[in-house]
């Protein structure tokens, strides 16, 4: 018990006792293995080697898991791993930070849960049959840079989403889907502000019957405002 409280090194007990209850008790205390006297030295060496191999492999695995977890949580994009029912199984820290949600609240939530309300770029309800994660599971295909809005906890988030199906290498059956997403809310807001300004400028020019144009001096390409097209009665679709 004292050894186990300070270390995970393998413990092998050498004993002349043959009571099974004793062995069960020792194993419950954290003993890894035992040898009953008398025994051959080669047998002891084999026991030591096998237990050290297991210990080293376990330590390497734990180290790899720690490095993977740190790498996983260092990614700025949110990442979900979901099963075939789109229930979230694994997620990184960026995922719950982007959505401003407690980490524990994400466990076991479905991506098509009624709390997640998805909308298109023109603010209509998103057709869930075309939801990228649904399509990945259905078509065994990946989808990239799908823009959609997410109403969640009374907040609207604009997201750029990528989805990749998880496929078993032996059976070729789909086991789930990985979803990565980045928050483009601020970019979307700036884009909409620019569109509003352009619309207001076009409306103002229409009222004043004044247009404007620009020329790219490198290519000598001229770009007219909508009102210039109207002034000269030229179809905007004609280059």
Image (cartoon, helix red, strand yellow):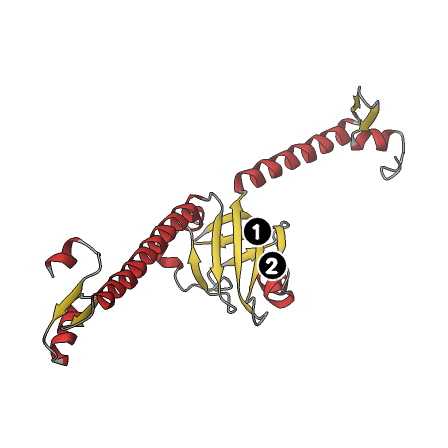
Please tell me which residue lies in front, 219 or 11: 11
Residue 28 placement, left or right of 143: left
Q: Going by the image, does 209 lie left or right of 49?
A: right
Mark 1 burial class by Cα count in 10 Å: few <14, some 14-19, many 20+: many
Q: Local crowd at mark 2 within 10 Å, few (<14), some, or many (≥20)?
A: many
- Residue at numbered disc 1: 161
Residue 172 visible, this orientation: yes
Instruction: Name the element at disc 1.
Output: strand
Is residue 102 at least partly visible in the picture?
Answer: no
Q: On residue 132, which mark appears?
A: 2
Look at 39% across and 61% down and name the residue there: 107
Residue 60 — which label? none
Disc 2 on helix, strand or loop?
Answer: helix
Task: Look at the numbered discs 2 and 1 and tell me whether their residues touch, using CB distance below 8 Å.
Answer: yes
- Residue appearing at x 57%, y 56% in the figure: 163
Which image quarter: residue 2?
Answer: bottom left
Question: In which quadrant of the rendered image does the C terminus lie?
Answer: top right
The image quadrant that residue 170 belongs to is bottom right
Q: Position of residue 232 (x, y in %)?
A: 89, 29
């Amino acid at each position: 018990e004292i050894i186990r409280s300070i270390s995970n090194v393998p413990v092998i007990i050498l004993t002349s006792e043959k009571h099974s209850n004793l062995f069960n008790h020792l194993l419950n205390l954290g003993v890894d293995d035992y040898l009953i006297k008398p025994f051959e030295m080669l047998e002891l060496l084999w026991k030591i080697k096998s237990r050290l191999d297991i210990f080293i492999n376990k330590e390497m695995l734990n180290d790899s898991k720690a490095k993977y977890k740190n790498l996983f949580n260092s990614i700025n994009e949110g990442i979900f791993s979901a099963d075939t029912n789109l229930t979230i199984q694994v997620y990184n820290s960026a995922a719950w930070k982007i959505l401003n949600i407690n980490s524990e609240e994400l466990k076991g939530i479905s991506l098509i849960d009624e709390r997640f309300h998805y909308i298109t770029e023109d603010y209509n309800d998103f057709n869930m049959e075309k939801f990228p994660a649904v399509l990945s599971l259905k078509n065994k295909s990946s989808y990239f840079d799908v823009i959609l809005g997410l109403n969640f906890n009374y907040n609207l988030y604009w997201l750029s989403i990528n989805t990749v199906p998880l496929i078993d290498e032996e059976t070729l059956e789909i086991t789930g889907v990985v979803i990565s997403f980045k928050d483009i809310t601020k970019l979307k807001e700036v884009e909409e502000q620019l569109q509003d300004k352009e619309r207001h400028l076009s409306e103002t020019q229409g009222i004043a019957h004044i247009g404007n144009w620009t020329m790219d001096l490198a290519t000598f390409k001229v770009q007219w405002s909508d009102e210039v097209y109207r002034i000269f009665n030229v179809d905007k679709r004609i280059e």
